[in-house]
Image: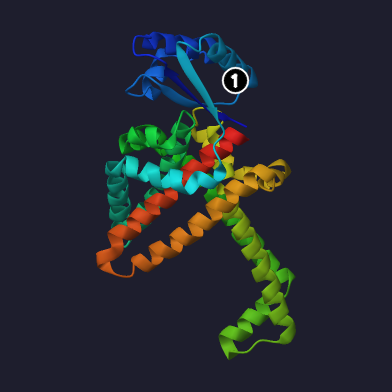
Amino acid sequence: MSVRVTIRRRREEVPEEFVYSVLVSTLGMSREEYERIKNEDGSVSLYVKDPEALLKLQEIGEKHSELVEIVFERESAGGLFSVSIGAVRANWGLAFSWSAVVFLLLLISLVPIIGFFASVLLNVFMYSFIIYASSELLGGSAERIFEGLSLREVFSKHMANGFGMWLGFLVIGIGFFVVSLILIFAFGALGGISDIVNYGTVREGAFVSILIVFLLLLTVGLWYVYALPLLIAKLVEKGDPNFERSFLTPFNLFKPSFIRETFSNWYLRIGGIWSIGVTAGFMGATLLSVLIITIPAALLVMYWINVLFAICSAESARRG
């Protein structure tokens, strides 16, 4: 489990280079990484997972307590809702630009022929943004990180990763469709469905078959949504993602170790919060999208869902 560590100078006369030297000696941090996470007052806040590095930081904090203050904080998963709202507020420009891209692609997707490609691009963009934000969030607090996020990074560095993940999910989706058909035939539900379509009635035995197939598919679907943050975590926790790893990541869904991990004590909290958030957010966005005047609000709710998604994914990567 990772710990959020904040390092700040005790006095203004203490040089910022001292803070940098602490990070170099304990974490091997580069100058570029330090400049990216440094706050205006010279302090830094980041997540540390290595127990040895945490011990070294604690020793330095005790030895040089007159120069620096090193605070260790374990963030609660229960605060993820407030963290996500703070992240949205930290960069309204990103929120509005994300909403504009999504709205434009949704409009184009309504056009025949080219609409198919627009819908694919929309899904790729969504995955790309999640991968980008989740990767960046591993380096510090959500509000601080989101202040510096830009959609330019999504289009310039992560669209290939988003396409790889979309392609992986497409392969799984086709397989899921085939398995669903097999289940329908295996449970004898096809005849019941045919009766409903042709005669508006259904035999008692066929009704039970339809119910069994429906409950199985519903259970798998709900578990899939619940497991999504952990799935993204498996991609970003290994460092800079690429097309190949992005494509293979969705297939973690079939690994017994991954399935067990989704029911671990620490992920039950994160997955539960994500499930509640995405359900409430989706319902809210759906209701708001009914009227043209409230569509901008619906887009912002969708953006918040994606922010919460990224935060839950990063939190899962830090705790895994």
Q: Is residue 61 left or right of residue 211?
A: left
Q: Nearer the viewer, residue 66 or 104?
A: 66
Q: Position of residue 219 (x, y in %)?
A: 65, 62
Q: Is residue 241 left or right of residue 147?
A: right
- Image vertical order of residue 102 relative to residue 34, above or below: below
Q: Position of residue 284 (x, y in %)?
A: 41, 63
Q: Nearer the viewer, residue 219 or 23?
A: 23
What residue is shown with label 1? 54
**Residue in the picture at 67% in, 80% down:** 191
Residue 166 seen anywhere in this rendered image of the structure:
no
Q: Nearer the viewer, residue 130 or 264?
A: 264
Q: Amino acid at mark 1?
A: Leu
Determine which quarter of the picture holds residue 75.
top right
Q: Position of residue 306 (x, y in %)?
A: 43, 48
**Residue in the picture at 33% in, 56% down:** 299
**Residue in the picture at 66% in, 47% down:** 262
Disc 1: CA contacts within 10 A as few (<14), some (14-19) or many (>=20): some
Q: Secondary structure at mark 1?
A: helix
Q: Quadrant of the C terminus?
A: top right
